[in-house]
């Protein structure tokens, strides 16, 4: 059964990435595949539990793919899916807006 999405497209987008951690995960994965530890180091202040939960939600919603290697210790890598990469223009606009806002406030 498919999950019912809100009628408003802005609300759909916010439902998928409207959390600070998800946007930062997207930002870090835009450059390519990353291991869990690298993501955790790159996202200041995120706990392991919160990062894991957000990555799982993003995998369920089709934004991130997860690859587990049969090694000891296990190696897990995360990559944006085509749908995840399609959010690049959104993040680019957020970056430009944030830079302009910072300049005004400084």
Image: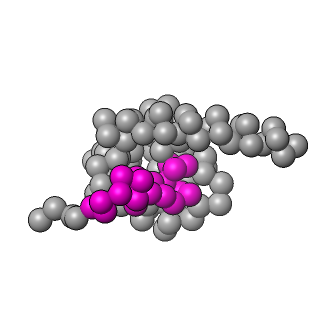
Specify the farthest residue to the right: 106
Residues in magenta?
Answer: 5-25
Q: Quadrant of residue 95?
A: top right
Specify the farthest residue to the bottom: 49
Comparing 90 with 82, the one in front is 90
Residue 88 position (above or below residue 22)? above
Comparing 8 with 19, the one in front is 8
Residue 99: where, in percent of width, then height?
Answer: 72, 37
Residue 100: where, in percent of width, then height?
Answer: 73, 37
* 18 in magenta: yes
Q: Quadrant of residue 96?
A: top right
User: Which quadrant is the C terminus positioned in?
Assistant: top right
Residue 81: where, in percent of width, then height?
Answer: 32, 39
The kind of secondary structure the magenta stretch mainly shows is helix
Residue 31: where, in percent of width, then height?
Answer: 49, 31
Residue at 30% across, 55% down: 61
Q: Is residue 24 left or right of residue 1?
A: right
Specify the farthest residue to the front: 8
Q: Is residue 3 left or right of residue 71?
A: left
Residue at 59% across, 61% down: 46
Comparing 36 with 15, the one in front is 15
Residue at 44% across, 57% down: 14
Q: Is residue 94 left or right of residue 101?
A: left
Q: Does residue 61 appear anywhere in the picture?
A: yes
* 19 in magenta: yes
Comparing 76 with 94, the one in front is 94
Residue at 42% across, 65% down: 53
Q: Does residue 68 appear anywhere in the picture?
A: no
Coloring scheme used? one colour
User: Which quadrant is the N terminus positioned in?
Assistant: bottom left
Residue 65 position (above or below residue 46)? above
């Amino acid at each position: 059964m498919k999950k019912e999405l809100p009628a408003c497209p802005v609300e759909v987008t916010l439902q998928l990435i409207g959390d600070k951690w998800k946007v930062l995960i997207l930002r870090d994965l835009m450059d390519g595949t990353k291991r869990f530890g690298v993501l955790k180091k790159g996202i200041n202040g995120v706990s392991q539990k919160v990062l894991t939960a957000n990555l799982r939600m993003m995998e369920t919603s089709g934004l991130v793919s997860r690859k587990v290697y049969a090694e000891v210790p296990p190696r897990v890598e995360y990559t944006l899916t085509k749908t995840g990469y399609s959010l690049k223009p959104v993040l680019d606009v957020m970056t430009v807006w944030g830079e302009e806002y910072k300049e005004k406030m400084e």
